[in-house]
Amino acid sequence: MAMIKCPECGRQISDKAPFCPNCGVAIAGKVIRCPQCGEIYFKDQEMCPNCHHLTKLSGTVGNNSRPQETFTPRQPASAPQQPATKQPQTDAGSGRGGATPPPVPPKPKKKNHNALIAAVILAIVLCGVCFYFYNDAKTSKEEEAYEYAMKSDDPLVLQTYLDNYKDAPEAHIDSIQAHLDALKQIDADWTNAVVSGSKQALLDYLTKHPDSEHKAEAQHKIDSIDWAFAANANTMDELQAYLDEHPNGEHVDQANTAIQKLKVKTVQPEEKVMVTASLRHFFQAVNANDEAALQASVAPVMSNFLGKADATKADAAVFLQKIYKDDITGMTWKLGNDAKIDKREVGQDEYEYTVNISATQDIQRTDPTKPKHCTFKIKAKISPDGLISAMSMTQIIQ
């Protein structure tokens, strides 16, 4: 085995190779070596492309045989010898005699560049296709990133888009930048509201940014501020105001507990009205000398009534009969404005009230020598249903 030069591409290959591994041209049985200069070339060529040694001619034997010449026969011995001359050969194409012209060397076979051109074109097309799909994928990725950033309220997401897509469409960049600026302004407003610690500043922030990511935190801070104020005041009005403004607030249970404690200890205005009304009904019945109305204003059983324990409605009627004597034609009881009321819990949301109050009695008598004006100190208990359950009266001597 010997190394030869491929007659097509010039690369060094084995003379036993069936084809050139570089250009693919057939080698085995298709090439010969020029006996004159040693050049390797295709055996179907008429001559060596290097030295133009003929490969085949009419009458040659084998691929490497030299071309043979034809001579005329010799003259007889008696005849003077003539120099041997070559017999003219007839031009097969023209029919004319004469010497055979030297063969015209064939033009060197042009290498076929069609495959190379096709490969270049294919490569260009592939590059174009790859660039198209790459550019399309890049555009699609940018569009997805843009839509995600526009829906985000995280400034870091928007800034990342601006950093990664500097060659994005100008409209996209402008929209993202505007969104980012708006988020930064919201953060600045939030910082100012928190630093101020003011309920009004937080309310203003929510009014300006109702959909802010800080909405829940702002509402929490407002709830805490209102509860702190109500808890410090510890009044029915302020505690109820907190519940009215924050029906689902974080301190609803605490507010209700505080209100319950206040109810046990504090007589509310409506309770004071109820207690004084119960006493007023009793004395109005006395003024009218109305036994039925008087009995309707007291409990069926009273723990004490004007010194009698476990008194009944009948005892109240007896009192009315005693108070109106023969010389009394009428009387008017008036309650003072000095009522002092205490309360105690006797059941779930049920209270018994103890009231101390002054009262004056103006009497219309037939006997002018008897007193017509008296002042009493009254202590009474009012049941949860508004009935008098105990009563005592002490006259104040002036």
Image: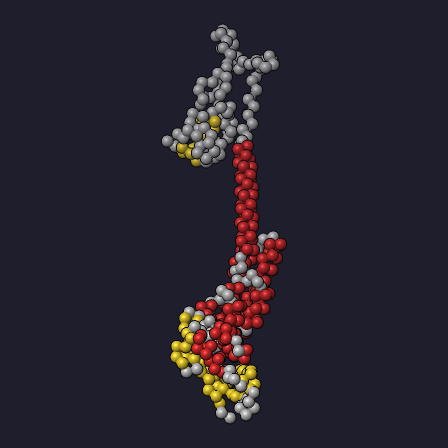
Residue nearest the viewer, comparing 20 with 196: 196
Residue located 61% across and 57% down the image: 174
Tell me how many marks there are: 0
Is residue 219 shown above or below 1?
below
- Is 385 left, or right, of 118 in this rendering? left
Residue drawn 45% across and 18% down?
61
Identify which residue, 305 or 364, lies in the foreground.
Answer: 364
Is residue 258 visible to the viewer in this orientation of the structure?
no
Above or below 50: residue 196: below
Residue 89 image point, x, y percent = 55, 14
Residue 256: % across, % down: 46, 70
Vertical arrangement, residue 34 with respect to residue 182, above or below:
above
Who's the residue at 53% across and 57% down the image? 152
Residue drawn at (43%, 35%), measured in percent from left and top? Answer: 12
In the picture as drawn, the residue positioned furthest to the front comes out as 326
> Residue furthest toward the left?
1
**Residue 174 visible to an observer of this rendering:** yes
Quadrant location, the N terminus = top left
Residue 54: x, y in percent? 50, 24
